Amino acid sequence: MHAVQRLGVGYHFEAEIEEALEKVHDMGEDLFTNFDGRGTDLYHAALRFRLLRQQGFPVSLDGFRKLKNSEGRFKEWLSRDEQGLLSLYEAAHIAFHGEDILDETLNFATKNLKSILLTNKNISNAVQRQIDFALFVPAWKCVPRSLARHSLDFYSDQGALLQNQKLLTFAKLDFNMVQSIHKQELRELSE
């Protein structure tokens, strides 16, 4: 679902996406249920939060409190989980006014992602590109076609990261078709 939306083809699967998210929401469990305090599922917990919140489902913020220690600071290991931190960063952008825990999470994630880019020489080029793009323009605030273009380039370069190569091919065809339609409309308007 995440890749489908990032690649710009989510509009073809709106009913299926809605149905899948309803099932996740109807489970009624804390999104951080499988979260064991060591980051084994931070990426997926934050992703589920973002996808549900993005589609307008009411989602509890209680799971975000599990990210803090007894002193109220974010747990140290969070800053070492690049993918989890990136997912957390994207999720924290979908905050409503007064949701201080998400504001704190966003500040924490931003600071640590920037630090990773400056100090961690062991991260892959793929992860570095993801972090750079997210810090430049978070997915939630990005123009969908621009996000699709970036994601197409990213997944094309890092094909192994996308499990379904047919989805990538479909997304490329769809992107080119929509771009062709936009060019035709622009041509007609300019005449």
Image: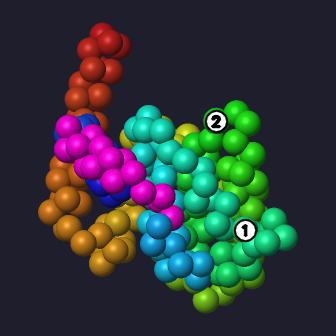
Q: Is residue 126 magenta?
A: no
Q: Which mark is residue 68?
A: 1
Q: Residue at x 29, y 70 (%)?
A: 162
Query: Camera-side residue: 123 or 1?
Result: 1
CA gap, disc 2 and disc 1: 20 Å
Relative side of 2 to 18, left or right: right
Q: Amino acid at mark 1?
A: Lys
Q: How is the image coloured?
A: rainbow
Mark 2 vs mark 1, foreground winner is 1
Q: Residue furthest bottom?
A: 122
Magenta region: which residues? 15-32
Q: Amino acid at mark 2?
A: Phe
Q: Position of residue 140 (x, y in %)?
A: 52, 43
Query: Camera-side residue: 31 or 104?
Result: 31
Q: Which mark is residue 129?
A: none
Query: Camera-side residue: 88 or 35?
Result: 35
Relative side of 56 to 66, left or right: left
Q: Residue at x 39, y 51 (%)?
A: 28
> Which quarter of the figure is the C terminus placed in?
top left
Q: Position of residue 56 (x, y in %)?
A: 44, 35
Relative side of 18 to 96, left or right: left
Q: Is residue 97 above or below residue 53?
A: above
Relative side of 133 to 21, left or right: right
Q: Are marks 2 and 1 in contact (CB under 8 Å)?
A: no
Q: Is residue 49 above or below residue 55?
A: below
- Magenta residues: mostly which secondary structure? helix
Q: Position of residue 101 (x, y in %)?
A: 71, 51
Q: Is residue 87 visible?
A: yes
Q: Is residue 25 magenta?
A: yes
Report the residue marked by disc 2.
96
**For the residue labelled by badge 1, is the local secondary structure a helix, a strand or a loop?**
loop
Q: Residue furthest right?
A: 71
